[in-house]
Image: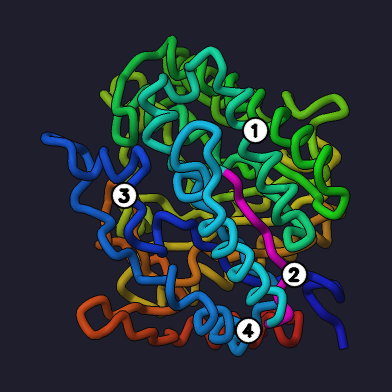
Amino acid sequence: MQVDFPPGFLWGSATSAHQVEGGNVNNDWWDFEHRPGTAARWSSGDGIDHYHRYAEDFALLRSLGHNAHRLSLEWSRIEPAPGEFSRAATAHYRRVLTALAETGMTAFVTLHHFTLPRWFAAAGGWLAPDALTVFARYCRYVAVELGELMPYVCTVNEPQMVALHGYLEGCHPPGVASEALWKRVGRRLLEAHFAAVRAVRGASRRSLVGLAVQLPLLVPALDDEECRALRRLMRHEIVDLHLDGLTGPDRGDFLGVQYYRKQWVDPRSPTRFAEPPAGCRTTQMGWAVHPDGLRQMLHRAAETRLPLFVTENGIATEDDTERIDYLLTHLAAVAQALAEGIDVRGYLHWSAFDNFEWSEGYRPRFGLIAVDRDAGFARHPKPSAYVFAKVAETGRLPQPG
């Protein structure tokens, strides 16, 4: 029987600590959520209480056909003060990763997924003179303590978005708007990836290490030189800098590709991005749905000559029939890329659960599993979760009709 995905393909979903754990009060995002006049709509609060429910959550995901799972470690728990590492937090994450392994799911562990310890942010964050040394110290500690439980390590999640949202658009911490700082932070985060690769490899030979980049399909809003010029700039800072920069011995062992949308670049817009054209299908986030963009960006990512994993892809919608369509059309784009010779080895859906979506709060629904935060955080798999399970089980996409 012909399959769309090869044997050994990894299937799963993704979360990040701050979005699901709850109670991460010692990081810069908690501060940002509670700052007067903040861009954040509300507090992350208790998250979805994954901090206490991780074992049952992993069991549920495994029952839905997942053989891999991506999660992050909360740096501010592990290193609550400079150079002071928490044995209790380390033991907690050892229990988490052990439980994950015991379900039979392969772990993808992200070391930095947007949040920074308060003390690191207060010292200047990624712009501090010793930022790379401090980050490498944390990465080395984690690899020493947990390396045997981390088959795949993602160093930095979406470095381009950390820089863009935090230092140009101002909708994420530290909430500033500076083109110069935006570019500096983007480059610093690429260096942070290299530093993390060295730190992890120096402490754990069992872990494969990679960067996780978001790669939107960027196009000019109008066919004029101003739009084309801005598109070249944005593509360089968001795409080319981080792909072409993955050179040398510390570039890593794989690349995580994260794709959500097509974006129109327009210098006339205060955000530098135009709204999607009239009639374009959009999500709760206002993002344009364009499945072939995933295939195109996988081809672009393959120019690094690294093995690829789709480490995030998904849709914010209240209508799960839309999620099913989005899921299947984007998986078809991955299958097409595979057929065209692209080395894609797994697909991790964003997200496992409806959870805290940064400045947008709990309104966007990305999850395969709904969470009723008003009824004891009860979990309810959606129909899309079972569609995904069937594809994972068979390696085949449903045939039309």
Label number found at residue 62? 4
What residue range appears in magenta? Answer: 103-111
**Pointer 2 local density, CA inside 10 Å: few below 14, some 14–19, many at least 20:** many
User: Element under label 4?
Assistant: helix
Q: Earlier in the sequence, mark 4 or mark 3?
A: 3
Please name the residue that numbered disc 3 is placed on: 25
Q: Earlier in the sequence, mark 3 or mark 2?
A: 2
Magenta stretch containing residue 97, yes or no? no
Label number found at residue 28? none
Disc 3 versus disc 1: distance between alpha carbons? 22 Å
Disc 1 versus disc 4: distance between alpha carbons? 33 Å
Does residue 197 sit above or below 126 in this rendering? below
Q: Are marks 1 and 4 in contact (CB under 8 Å)?
A: no
Disc 2 versus disc 1: distance between alpha carbons? 30 Å
Q: Position of residue 190 (x, y in %)?
A: 64, 26
Image quarter hosting the C terminus: bottom right
Q: Earlier in the sequence, mark 1 or mark 4?
A: 4
Nearer to me, 58 or 282: 58
Q: Amino acid at mark 4?
A: Arg
Q: Position of residue 367 (x, y in %)?
A: 43, 71
5 left or right of 34 in image: right
Image depth: mark 2 or mark 1 in front: 1
Nearer to me, 273 or 92: 92
Please name the residue that numbered disc 2 is placed on: 10
User: Element under label 3?
Assistant: loop
Q: Residue placed at 39% from the left, 87% from the top?
A: 380
Q: Quadrant of residue 284?
A: bottom left
